[in-house]
Amino acid sequence: MNLNPALTRYRIVAWIVGVLLIVLTVGTVLKYTTDDDTIVAIVGPAHGFLYMIYLVLAADLARRARWKLPFTVLVLLAGTVPFLSFVAERVVTRRVRDAFPLVASGAP
C-alpha cells in the first residue's frame, strides 16, 4: 500500500495548521493586551477551516495506516495545542515510515 500521498498531504496541512495556531495564539494575546483583534479576526477562521481539513487528512491517514483509536485521537487533537502539531507530524512520519518501509524509500 502506498501511503506517500496521504502522508505528504497530512504533513503539509499539519505544518500549516501549526503555524496558524501559533499566529492565532499571538493574536489572542494581543487582542487581550492591546484590544486589537485584527489577527484573531483574520487567522481564526482560516485556522478553523484548515483544522477541519487537518482532521479529514489525519483520519484518512489513520485509516490507511490502521492506527489504533487512542493514537488517532491524539493526532487529531494535536492541531489544537500550539507546537504540538509539529511534534505529532514528526511522530506520525516516523511511525508510518517504520511500519511501511516503502514509504521511507519513496518507492511506488
Image (cartoon, rainbow, N blue to C red):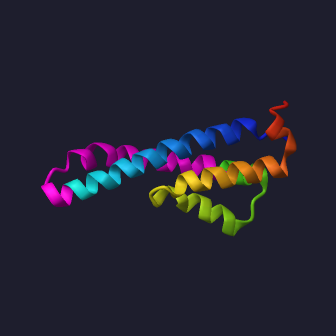
How far from the left and from the top, in percent, is residue 25? 34, 55
Which residue occupies 14% across, 55% down?
A: 34
Which residue occupies 79% across, 46% down?
A: 97
- 99 relative position to 55: left or right: right
User: Would residue 42 be counted in the magenta stretch?
Assistant: yes
How far from the left and from the top, in percent, is residue 41? 25, 47
Quarter of the figure with residue 73: bottom right
**Quick check: 100 above or below 28?**
above
- 47 relative position to 78: left or right: left
Q: Main secondary structure of the magenta part?
A: helix
Number of callouts in the render? 0
How far from the left and from the top, in percent, is residue 86? 55, 51
Quadrant placement of the N terminus: top right
**Quick check: 1 above or below 79?**
above
How far from the left and from the top, in percent, is residue 16? 48, 42
User: Would residue 47 be counted in the magenta stretch?
Assistant: yes
Which residue occupies 67% across, 48% down?
A: 60
- 29 relative position to 91: left or right: left
Q: Which residues are magenta?
A: 31-59
* Residue at the far top in the pictured view: 108
Quadrant placement of the C terminus: top right
* Residue at the far bottom in the pictured view: 70
Nearer the observer, 19 or 45: 19
Quarter of the figure with residue 66: bottom right
* Residue at the far left in the pictured view: 35
Which residue occupies 69% across, 42% down?
A: 7
